[in-house]
């Protein structure tokens, strides 16, 4: 049976007895959340800044999209100071059932709620939103079909017009044999988050690439039991592909403009679920004009009409950066304690050394520090 990669990923990850409905993610791959509680502390600092910018409202949201086992939501809740914790409304969003144990204060949902006022964090969520793969031929792009049982591939039909437009705008291929992962479903998934942000900030954190340096043969990868494996979509492994965060940024800006009037409502059209299925009509369409700055560009994403203008009604302001830069700004430095502390306070020295090691892993160049951070704010 031959399927498009998008359909095959959907079934393998989220179908009946799919990987994410059956497995504990922490048993198969390491994320920033699992690497150290320092990550949750950094997210809390971001939440405090958003809360202050909103004027410390009676209720402030923390929404963890792709919450998995709930460690991030639980970690932020546990570390929140009393003045914030008593106002904090925490929602974990995931297709999997509510994990146990989890603090009773944490709500659990299969879709992002409407009217969010606070902070949305999507850590390593977009890379698991299913997408199609295209390969360039002498006759133009063709969809790559896959046999779910074996992982064998063959070429199928041409992509639909919307996907061809996305490829032309965001990932043009030039030579036969080159491949691209069509990120339009990720754009739509992220846009569906932004239209539900009434006020505050949404952050997507993921393996990322940008238009100046797309990988010529794609990034489709499998993970099982902590190891890289061939991406066979039979439900036995995680299947992931890096995220075109610049395209998601532009989609979020368009959503911030077109969805502003409805963002404060409890629901906005068809939310879709955490897979990114459904979404916001054509918000993720490749028709936006102009480009998006690369990693480290702290301006609003430029060149997308006037959508990114903070003076526009309901507009979002965008920052694209790396995890290293974002966490350094939040005080995560990896600085080792002074050696003298080992003599005066050996236990304190060991604790500080452990923390420094954990911080260093989170900001390491060539590792977690290279993750992309897409930050879109409506404040």
Image (cartoon, helix red, strand yellow):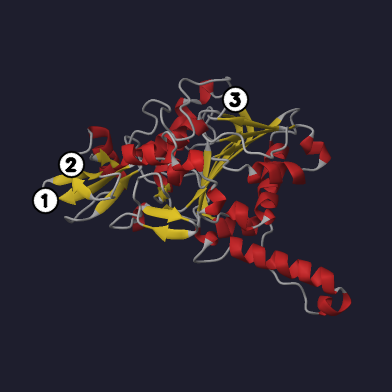
Q: Residue at x 67, y 40 (%)?
A: 50
Residue 368, percent across and down?
54, 60
- Res 111 label: none
Which image quadrant for residue 218?
bottom left
Residue 5, percent across and down?
30, 42
Q: Is residue 220 above or below residue 92?
A: below
- Res 138 label: 1
Give the structural element (helix, strand or loop) at label 3. loop
Circle 2 Cα neighbour tier, 10 Å, few/some/many (<14 / 14–19 / ≥20): some
Q: Are marks 1 and 3 in contact (CB under 8 Å)?
A: no
Q: Is residue 199 above or below residue 23?
A: above
Circle 3 Cα neighbour tier, 10 Å, few/some/many (<14 / 14–19 / ≥20): some
Circle 1 Cα neighbour tier, 10 Å, few/some/many (<14 / 14–19 / ≥20): few
Q: Are marks 2 and 3 in contact (CB under 8 Å)?
A: no
Q: Is residue 262 above or below residue 92?
A: above
Q: Measure how far apart labels 1 and 2 are at the Cα level.
A: 14 Å
Q: Is residue 307 visible?
A: no
Q: Is residue 180 visible?
A: yes
State which tag comes first along the sequence, 2 or 3.
3
Pair 2/3: label in front: 2
Quadrant for the C terminus in the image: top right
State which tag comes first along the sequence, 1 or 3.
3
State which tag comes first along the sequence, 1 or 2.
1
Identify the residue position indicated by label 2 in the image.
156
Give the structural element (helix, strand or loop) at label 2. loop
Give the structural element (helix, strand or loop) at label 1. loop
Q: Measure how far apart labels 1 and 3 are at the Cα level.
A: 48 Å
Quadrant for the N terminus in the image: top left
């Amino acid at each position: 049976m031959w399927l498009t990669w998008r359909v095959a990923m959907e079934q393998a990850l989220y179908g009946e007895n799919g990987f994410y409905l059956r497995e504990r993610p922490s048993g198969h791959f390491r994320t920033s959340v699992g690497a150290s509680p320092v990550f949750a502390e950094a997210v809390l600092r971001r939440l405090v800044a958003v809360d202050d910018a909103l004027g410390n409202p009676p209720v402030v949201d923390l929404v963890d999209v792709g919450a998995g086992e709930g460690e991030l939501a639980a970690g932020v809740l546990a570390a929140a100071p009393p003045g914030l914790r008593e106002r904090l409304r925490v929602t974990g969003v995931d297709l999997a059932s509510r994990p146990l144990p989890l603090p009773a204060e944490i709500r659990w949902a299969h879709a992002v709620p409407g009217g969010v006022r606070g902070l949305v964090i999507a850590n390593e969520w977009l890379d698991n939103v299913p997408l199609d793969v295209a390969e360039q031929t002498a006759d133009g792009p063709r969809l790559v079909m896959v046999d779910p049982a074996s992982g064998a591939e063959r070429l199928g039909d041409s992509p639909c017009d919307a996907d061809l437009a996305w490829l032309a705008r965001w990932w043009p291929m030039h030579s036969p044999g080159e491949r691209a992962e069509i990120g339009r479903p990720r754009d739509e998934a992220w846009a569906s988050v932004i239209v539900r942000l009434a006020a505050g900030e949404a952050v997507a954190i993921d393996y990322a690439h940008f238009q100046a340096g797309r990988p010529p043969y794609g990034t489709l990868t499998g993970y099982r039991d902590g190891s890289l494996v061939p991406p066979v979509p039979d439900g036995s492994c995680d299947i992931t592909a890096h995220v075109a965060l610049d395209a998601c940024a532009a989609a979020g800006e368009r959503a911030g403009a077109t969805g502003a009037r409805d963002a404060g409502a409890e629901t906005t059209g068809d939310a879709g679920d955490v897979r990114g299925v459904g979404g916001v009509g054509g918000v993720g369409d490749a028709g936006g004009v102009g480009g998006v700055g690369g990693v480290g560009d702290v301006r609003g994403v430029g060149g997308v009409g006037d959508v990114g203008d903070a003076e526009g009604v309901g507009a979002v302001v965008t920052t694209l950066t790396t995890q290293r830069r974002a966490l350094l700004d939040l005080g995560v430095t990896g600085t080792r304690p002074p050696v003298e502390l080992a003599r005066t306070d050996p236990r304190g020295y060991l604790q500080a050394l452990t923390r420094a090691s954990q911080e260093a892993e989170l900001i390491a160049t060539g590792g977690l520090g290279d993750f992309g951070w897409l930050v879109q704010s409506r404040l």
